[in-house]
Image (tube, rainbow, N blue to C red):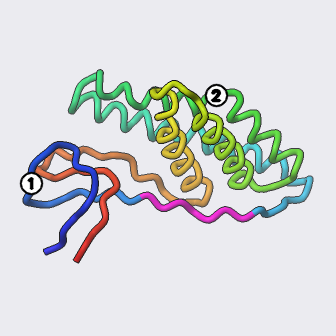
Amino acid sequence: MDKLVGIPVSPGIGIGRAFVHRVERPQVAKRRISRFKVEAETERFLNCLVLVAEEIRRTRRIVEVEHGAELAQIFEAQLAMLQDDQVKGQTVKTIRADRVVAEHAFSQTMERLKEMFGHIENEYLRARVGDITDIEHQVMARLAGGELRGFRSHREERALGHRVDEQR
């Protein structure tokens, strides 16, 4: 039997099958690209944002059907970040100016954004760093060629937690 340690979704003891969601962030190398590939790299980045937004919208619909519209609202902040002109603009600007791959440019943009949010006095806004990190992971996985695995329906009896580590 494995023991899972983490932040429970609700108090108590859970016995049964568990859904463990692991987020692995691809390594980002500062690879330069030729000036002839800059526009293709820019398009690759912008197309990636569209694909990630579609996946988040699918997840939001599943959550809305199964748990209600109020809970599904949590995805609005992530969608807003994907559509944010500063996030898109700064990343595209970095791709073009520094002639680097989208992964590196986007990572730099998100690091600056996380640092900025980390210094905000408003606790609610400061907590949005988690949303920024989630979006960063999703976009980076898609840029690296990975398939996103959005939150599927989990109607079966399962235990859910956050930041879970297995202990044997």
| Residue ranking furthest to the bottom | 168
The main secondary structure of the magenta stretch is: loop
Residue 131 magenta-highlighted: no
Query: Neighbour class for label 1 at 10 Å: few (<14), some, many (≥20)?
Result: few
Which is in the foreground here, disc 2 or disc 1? 1
Kindly identify which residue carries mark 2: 84
Q: Quadrant of residue 50?
A: top right
Kindly identify which residue carries mark 1: 13
Q: Position of residue 14 (x, y in %)?
A: 10, 55
Tell which of 29 and 9 is nearer to you. 9
User: Residue at horizontal 55%, vertical 27%?
Assistant: 121
Q: Quadrant of residue 10?
A: top left
User: Residue at horizontal 47%, vertical 41%?
Assistant: 130
Circle 1 SS class: loop
Q: Which residues are magenta?
A: 23-29
| Residue ranking furthest to the top | 70
